[in-house]
Amino acid sequence: MKLPLIACQHIWHITCCLLALLASLPLLWPRMLPHAWRASAPEYAGDAIMAAILVSLTVLGIASLFMLLRLRNLRTLLQCAIWAFEWLLTGAIFAVLAYFANVPPPPAMQEPHVTPQSKPPVFPPSDIIEGPHALAIPIVPDSPASATLQSAPHLVELEARLPDLLRAYVSQSPRWAASLSDQNFYTKPWHVVMILQDQDSGPGFVHVAFMHLVDGEQLPAGYAVVKGGSPFPELSESGKQFPDLALDLDGSHYLLLAWRGPDDSPHARGAINAAIRAVDEMVRPLAENPTQATLSHLISGSTHAQFTADSPSAPDILLSEPYAQSGCYQAQILANPGEKGYLILRLVDNHSRETLLNFEIPAHHSHNPDELFIHNIPGDIPSHLRHTVLFDVVPPKAPLFIIRQDSDQRAREVVFELYFRPAGKEYSYPILSKIYSVHLHNE
């Protein structure tokens, strides 16, 4: 008695041949399938054809082995010849179908085209950062320039009614604290510089600082003491330098202003008035709402970055080198990693790949992917880590850092690489990197 597999093996072979032909139809006429299936059809069709051939070969092998064991050699050869004929016929039918389908030949192999990578851009450290840590503040001068000094009503009001609150703001603010009570502040780093943003008025900037006098101290030497609303002082005898001014706030505080730019009196007057107006506007919230909460907000600032339709939210690194403070920098990171962890800002020499500085700060985060947070460098560095990454040349209250390297080259391209390390994890992943041209300090 013959086994069903042996007796019906050609039915198996014919079925497999038909399945192989049916599976080849999507390869020959791909448009017969829905558009969404066309991309994956060749893979599944190839698998079906291969499965049909393997099943047919398995049936032939088992049947041939069974007949050889029964010493039916000639019958085995005949069955193999019939199997070969069936698959040759299947191949011939496939060739006819392919002829009528007019399948285009596969594209010729081409050498891969390598697009030359352009050199990454190198940015100057002239980004404008925002918040109470910023030392470089853009201003637009008055045009035409007034002959009288701009008044500072909010500063005068605080000095008259709440001098201790004004004193607390100046002494605790990262913007003003480092230069407080230093009448030669403009010869040193870590002070505020108001930068002209009006191209028509030409270059120039105003150094600005507060001075606090205690009982018995003399008025600032070398300054022309003025009050808001009074006429500007006359130029020096040489007529070439606009005098440095000390704006009297009717108390123990003075606002020191030093113009540095073209020897143009109207130009200087417009810039100084704009600087006074900018500082007075900074303390306006404190004058209108003199509370500890307002003071804390003015000192710490907001952690939320503001964007417009023209500047969509995207992670970024900003670097500022305030005017006349060469080699001193402050950075700002705009990022939202979406989870608790730490942002790592690594400064790497673009040529030697030497790590120059490594900052690690706690990351502000939220689950809103369109929201970015402001992180200040070095302002947000934890106090117990500041001495390990900052150098003694920078005062503890100054929101600045310097980059040192044991090299004679002072100008260098430095890669600012931003990473995020999730809380409790050892690994970190990159977010972005930018290259800046900076000045290095030698050891």
Image (spheres, rainbow, N blue to C red):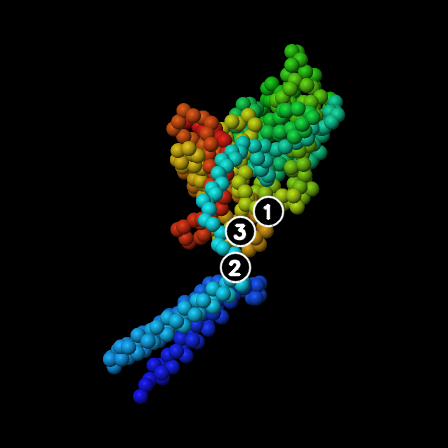
The nearer-to-camera label among 3 and 1 is 1
Q: Amino acid at mark 2?
A: Val
Residue 106 location, x and y as percent? Answer: 48, 54
Q: Earlier in the sequence, mark 2 or mark 3?
A: 2
Q: Give the distance between the C-alpha atoms of the residues marked 2 and 1, in whole angstroms.
A: 49 Å
Q: Amino acid at mark 1?
A: Ser
Residue 251 location, x and y as percent? Answer: 65, 30
The residue that label 2 is drawn on is: 103
The nearer-to-camera label among 2 and 3 is 2
The residue that label 1 is drawn on is: 313
Q: Secondary structure at mark 1?
A: loop
Q: Secondary structure at mark 2?
A: loop
Front position in the image: 198 or 211: 198
The residue that label 3 is drawn on is: 365
Residue drawn at the location 41% of the way across and 79% of the way down: 11
Residue 31 location, x and y as percent? Answer: 57, 63
Q: Give the distance between the C-alpha atoms of the residues marked 2 and 3, in whole angstroms.
A: 55 Å
Label 3: how many Cα within 10 Å (few below 14, some 14–19, many 20+): some
Quadrant, the C terminus: top left
Q: Secondary structure at mark 3?
A: loop
Residue 347 location, x and y as percent? Answer: 45, 37
The nearer-to-camera label among 2 and 1 is 2
